[in-house]
Image (cartoon, helix red, strand yellow):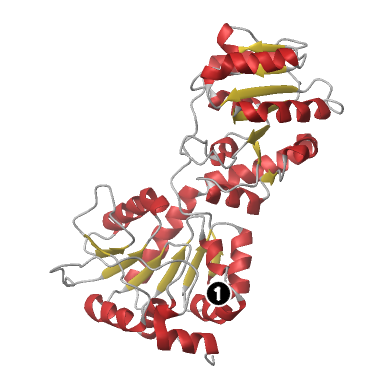
């Protein structure tokens, strides 16, 4: 294919042309030299992928005990790794650096697990007829995002991949539209560890399930006191269509339980408080679930969960929405980015969640997803997202073995 002006400029000036993402800082690889035998090069710069990277490294080492692995990333990798693994960071995405890197390491296969690409390195890899594989850990969709000037670079770079394992259909379509060859893209699910769901007391679940029977239920999880009145207003509006609707409120900070109770009393709600041993009997409108370590129970009881991720809620204490989805609860959430932004993006692309742009919209969103048929479709989509990790890891294992066991095809 003819080179676009943007790609010509990129090859001439390297990382002087801005590209999506940032280059990592360099760490000297010291006296490391390429050992004899096959070498797998895994580029995985995202810190959020560390657990998946360690699992993938372990998988490769177990499957291919005679293969060496070079991991390039940003910063230090924490965790026990096989003696087969070597580590180096990449200085910048310049053609000269890419050439020196390949002259030194001569990888037999290149695996990318990232939300941004390094065109100079990828083109150098492809020019040397080294197989290129892109695995999706949930952020591959971001590789398709570029401005008009850089779209030629993205298209040309994505076309260099021999295989692309995508996390979902929306990502597959976006990758193909951005330049990846359709014949090389396969939707396998995101490469990730199994979602760890919160525990649940089965006896409590059985008791409450029987008590609530056919009552519609929704959950407002880890809620700040400042959001309570807006949530209660949405609940009142939603009960006009679902008269027996029960709201379960889990405070972000249980030490504020008395303040929650004061507001509920002032607003005239019939409520029960979990920490006082009360139960959501007939007639109760709001159940204040102010006890520790029971979020898994509420996810299982509520077909819809609202997770309020305001700008002040960016700590690791905010629950991962994939936990709710794994337990069959449709996710409603605010528009602000948070620590679990990639998880929210994955659920949105699968149609398993709905964004609430402002609190005045919450009631309408709630009414829309409370319909049993709609909730069932969305819940199933969420479950598929959370259960695909093992299948994706197996697909990764198979494709790595295939490329290591056979001579790579010559690219056009």
Would you say residue 4 is visible in this rendering? no
The x and y percentages for residue 130 are: 36, 78
Farthest top residue in view = 277
Would you say residue 27 is visible in this rendering? yes
Quadrant assignment, res 131: bottom left
The x and y percentages for residue 33 are: 16, 72
* 318 horizontally vs 44: left or right: right
Q: Nearer the viewer, residue 150 or 262?
A: 262
Label 1: which residue? Answer: 180
> Which corner quadrant holds the N terminus?
bottom right
Above/below status of 118 relative to 135: below
Q: Residue at x 75, y 12 (%)?
A: 270
Q: At numbered mark 1, what does the secondary structure look like: helix, strand or loop? A: loop
Quadrant assignment, res 179: bottom right
Farthest bottom residue in view = 2
* 211 horizontally vs 83: left or right: right
Q: Nearer the viewer, residue 30 or 336?
A: 336
Q: Residue at x 53, y 85 (%)?
A: 6
Q: Nearer the viewer, residue 134 or 276?
A: 276
Farthest left residue in view = 31
Badge 1 crowding class, 10 Å Cα cut-off, few under 14, some 14 to 19, many 20 or more, is: many
Above/below status of 314 relative to 164: above
State the count of labels. Answer: 1
Q: Residue at x 12, y 69 (%)?
A: 31
The x and y percentages for residue 409 are: 41, 81
The x and y percentages for residue 216 are: 75, 25
């Amino acid at each position: 294919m003819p080179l676009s002006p943007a790609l010509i400029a990129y090859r001439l000036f390297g990382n002087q042309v801005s590209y999506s993402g940032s280059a990592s800082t360099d760490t000297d690889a010291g006296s490391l030299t390429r050992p004899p035998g096959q070498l797998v090069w895994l580029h995985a710069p995202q810190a959020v992928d560390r657990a998946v990277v360690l699992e993938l490294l372990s998988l490769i080492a177990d499957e291919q005990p005679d293969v060496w692995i070079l991991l390039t990333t940003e910063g230090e990798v924490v965790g026990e790794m096989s003696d087969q693994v070597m580590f180096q960071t990449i200085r910048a995405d310049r053609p000269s650096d890419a050439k020196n890197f390949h002259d030194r390491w001569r990888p037999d296969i290149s695996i990318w697990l990232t939300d941004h690409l390094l065109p100079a390195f990828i083109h150098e890899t492809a020019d040397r007829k080294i197989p290129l594989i892109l695995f999706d850990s949930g952020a591959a969709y971001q590789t398709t995002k570029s401005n008009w000037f850089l779209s030629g670079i993205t298209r040309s770079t994505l076309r260099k991949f021999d295989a692309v394992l995508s996390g979902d259909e929306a990502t597959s379509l976006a990758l193909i539209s951005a330049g990846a060859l359709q014949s090389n893209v396969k939707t396998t699910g995101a490469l990730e560890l199994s979602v760890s769901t919160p525990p649940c007391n089965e006896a409590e679940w059985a008791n409450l399930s029987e008590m609530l029977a056919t009552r519609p239920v929704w959950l407002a999880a880890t809620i700040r006191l400042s959001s309570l009145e807006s949530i209660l207003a949405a609940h009142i509006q939603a009960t006009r269509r679902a008269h027996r609707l029960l709201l379960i409120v889990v405070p972000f900070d249980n030490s504020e339980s008395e303040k929650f109770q004061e507001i509920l009393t002032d607003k005239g709600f019939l409520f029960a408080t979990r920490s006082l041993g009360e139960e959501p009997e007939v007639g109760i409108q709001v159940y204040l679930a102010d006890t520790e370590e029971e979020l898994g129970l509420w996810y299982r009881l509520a077909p819809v969960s609202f997770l309020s991720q305001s700008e002040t809620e960016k700590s690791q204490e905010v629950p991962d929405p994939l936990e709710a989805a794994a337990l069959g609860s449709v996710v409603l959430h605010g528009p602000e980015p948070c620590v679990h932004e990639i998880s929210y993006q994955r659920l949105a692309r699968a149609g398993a969640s709905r964004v609430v742009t402002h609190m005045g919209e919450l009631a309408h969103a709630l009414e829309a997803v409370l319909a049993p048929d709609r909730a069932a479709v969305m819940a199933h989509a969420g479950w598929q997202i959370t259960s695909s990790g093992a299948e994706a890891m197996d697909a990764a294992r198979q494709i790595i073995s295939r490329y290591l066991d056979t001579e790579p095809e010559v690219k056009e």
